[in-house]
Structure formats: C-alpha cells, structure tokens
Amino acid sequence: MLQKAHEVERFASDPEKLALLAREESESTGAEVTPEEMRTRLTAGSTFLTQTNRGWTLAQMARSMLPLQHIVFEMDWMILLAPDGDPGFLTSDNPVSLFSPAYHVPGVGLLSNPDAHITFPISREICLLARHRQGRNHRVVRASAVDVRRANKGTILRADTQLYAPFQSQEIQRLHDSAVMKRGKPKRVMIKKGRVVED
C-alpha cells in the first residue's frame, strides 16, 4: 500500500502524466479537462488507502520478478543435505529466504551483494541453495548442523503465519512467535492533499 501511495504522489507531480490523464478524461467525458484540474482532483482531499483485493500486490510482484528471474537464473544452484541424525530443515508458507550478509546498507541485496544467497527448503533432508557464481562445481553438499540452523532461522523469520516442521520444538515455536510479534500490525497509509503523510 505504501508503494501505491507513493506512486499516486509521484503521478500528481508529473506534468506529462497529468496532461495525458486530462486528455483521456476529456475524450471520455466530452468536457474539457485541464492537467491542473486533474492535479486538484488527486490532491484536493485526504484519503486512507485500503487494499480490497490482492490483484495489485500480485501485479507488483510480477513486475519485480521479471528482472530478478535473470539474476536467479545466473546463480549456482546446489542441494544441501541435512547431516545424519539432525532434525532437519523447516519450511513455511513463505519458504524462500534471502541472506545478504556483511552489508547493512538499504538497497543492497541480491544483485549488488556478491555474498548474497537464497535458501529454499524442499523437505526435512533437502534444501536448495542459490548463490552467485564462485567457480565451484559442487552440486550436492552435506550441510553442517550450523548451516541447517541458519537456513531454518531464515525460514522462521520469513514465515507469514505458518511454519511446518517434521518435529516439535518449543524453541522454534518461540522464535516464530517472536518474529511475528516484532512485525506488529500493518500501518494505515494516508494521502493528504497529494502527499503521503502517514504509513
């Protein structure tokens, strides 16, 4: 919703887009509408944005996915096997985790961080790992217990509401509950006179 609010804000300050919208409105209604009138319509009042369906979110996801798919395609994919006797990998309702270590700069992520990698747990014994090409040809690797815990932590933090584990663990339940509580309730997004003032 915040992204949508910022798009409206940018649109209202773009003279070319306002002129195009005014022309389309004029053609549609038969009445002459100026770009300034369109800007006034967009910025005259205040409104809270609400999401009534997931269509817009899915469209944004698809747009973001297109450039990302080329990056992911170029990455090295490996199969991590849980060690013998280890409880194994967890999965969730949002199982793909991005790890971007050693960088704490906003905007630095999968593309710009050469150490970034993705985990995708498939089963208790198997987790896919994708990372930028590093000249190694390993396709199947026996993970350490530390590797399994690291992947599981990413899965727990990324879970929306559901966590799936082939074993019971109060510690994992506490980690999941703590991660969900830290997110808090989503904030409302408000546009006031064409500006995003609350998110």
Image: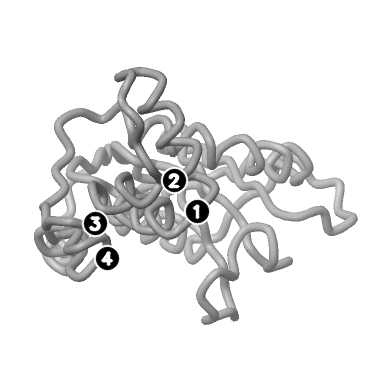
Q: Is residue 74 found left or right of 64 in the rendered image?
A: right
Give the label, 4 or 1, closer to the camera. 1
Q: CA distance from mark 1 to mark 2?
A: 5 Å
At label 2, the amino acid type is Leu
Give the label, 4 or 3, closer to the camera. 3
Q: CA distance from mark 3 to mark 2?
A: 12 Å
For label 4, the residue is 195
Judge whether residue 170 can be spotted in this image.
Answer: no
Callout 4–callout 3 Cβ contact below 8 Å? yes
Mark 3 neighbour class, 10 Å CA radius: few under 14, some 14 to 19, many 20 or more: some
At label 3, the amino acid type is Thr
Residue 10 position in % (x across, y down): 42, 57
For label 2, the residue is 18
Callout 1–callout 2 Cβ contact below 8 Å? yes
Q: Is residue 49 found left or right of 137 in the rendered image?
A: left
Q: Residue at x 23, y 43 (%)?
A: 163
